[in-house]
Image (cartoon, helix red, strand yellow):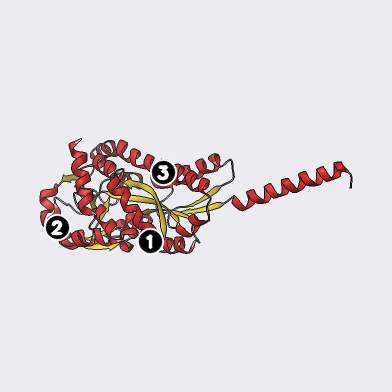
Amino acid sequence: MTRFKRLLLSATTTAALVAASMAVDARDFRLGLITPPPHIWTQAANNFAEELNKKSGGEHTVSVFPARQLGNEAQMVQQLQTGALDMAFLTIAEISNRVPDFGALYAPYLVEDIDQAAALLRSDAATDLLNKLPGGVGVVGVGYGMAGMRQVLSREAVQGPADIAGKKLRITPFEPIRDFYTALGAAPTPLPLPGVYDALANGQVDAIDMDFDSILVLKFYERADNLLISNHMMFPMVGVVSGRVWKQLSDADKSLIQTTMKAQLDDVISRFQAQEKDQEQQLRQLNINISEADRGQFADAIESWEGIWSKKAPSLVNLRKAVTEIKGN
């Protein structure tokens, strides 16, 4: 074999090894979430997919599956645990079903407004909770996003908490919010977000627990024209990666995924902050009936909720300390 042929063979072999190495490292990740395509969370997931592909030089791709295409959140968590699903944007609802301490984030009137909610989710107290995810759920928590503050939209007039009693009220299926509405005498009714519009139209539910953004973007006000502005609860979301998948990643890829996803999650928080007041004004300009309620009117329900969750969610103490510091700044 001539020297030229040996060099050519060596170069070809090296190129093949490099290509094989890249093929092993390259991943087509799957990311699931429950929100429909127009929702801010889904937009953020698509932005994350685009950014990760760009920053990895085209090595990694992310296929986004919105609107429960991969199942409900409980099913997606199971897929994450086995490694069948790589990533997800999850409400804290399903997380709190598995790690009750996360229920502290849903304490009624833990925060007063969207800005306090955003600051709390960026605090060390909230970040520390993410350390419970690998052992409790089998996923790695990258960071928090959020939706807007929760309100009540109803088919019939609602002037305050007393008018919620006896109503079939749509909730995201998890215990902290169920216990809150049970204390108000309502009948909490779990229902997937894509089914809410029709459920209001056909009377399957009488009212819904929802934020301004979804009420406007998904046009729920067309089927229920009574809005109780209460700001009674924040609604966090968490971006996660399967623990099994995480172990397979290089340190460089872990860092890339963390920084890229965290940036998109933080942008979700900022977007909800920026639009909350404007969306409230948009709703006030529609032909719907609007009432307002505050913490004092929910005092009995809050006391009942505290009686259940103060022991189940010990992190509530640290979160409240963080909120006190936020209010002081």
* Residue that numbered label 1 is attached to: 135
Report whether residue 280 is seen: yes
Q: Nearer the viewer, residue 240 or 190?
A: 240
Q: Nearer the viewer, mark 2 or mark 1?
A: 1
Which residue is more in the foreground, 321 or 50?
A: 321
Q: Position of residue 252 (x, y in %)?
A: 52, 45
Give, as a three-letter code, the residue at label 2: Ala
Q: Is residue 4 left or right of residue 256?
A: right
The residue pinned by badge 2 equals 301
The reply to whether residue 184 is visible in this rendering is no
**Residue type for callout 1:** Gly
Is 35 on the left-hand or right-hand side of 190?
right
Q: Secondary structure at mark 1?
A: helix
Secondary structure of the residue carrying tag 3 is: helix
**SS at circle 2:** helix
Q: Residue at x 39, y 44 (%)?
A: 265
Which of marks 2 and 3 precedes in the sequence?
Answer: 3
Q: Which residue is mark 3?
A: 262
Q: CA distance from mark 2 to mark 1?
A: 32 Å
Which quadrant of the figure has residue 208?
Answer: bottom left
Foreground: disc 3 or disc 1 = 1
Q: Please report whichever mark, 2 or 1, sits nearer to the chain's N-terminal start.
A: 1
Q: Quadrant of residue 132?
A: bottom left
Q: Is residue 100 above or below residue 288?
A: below
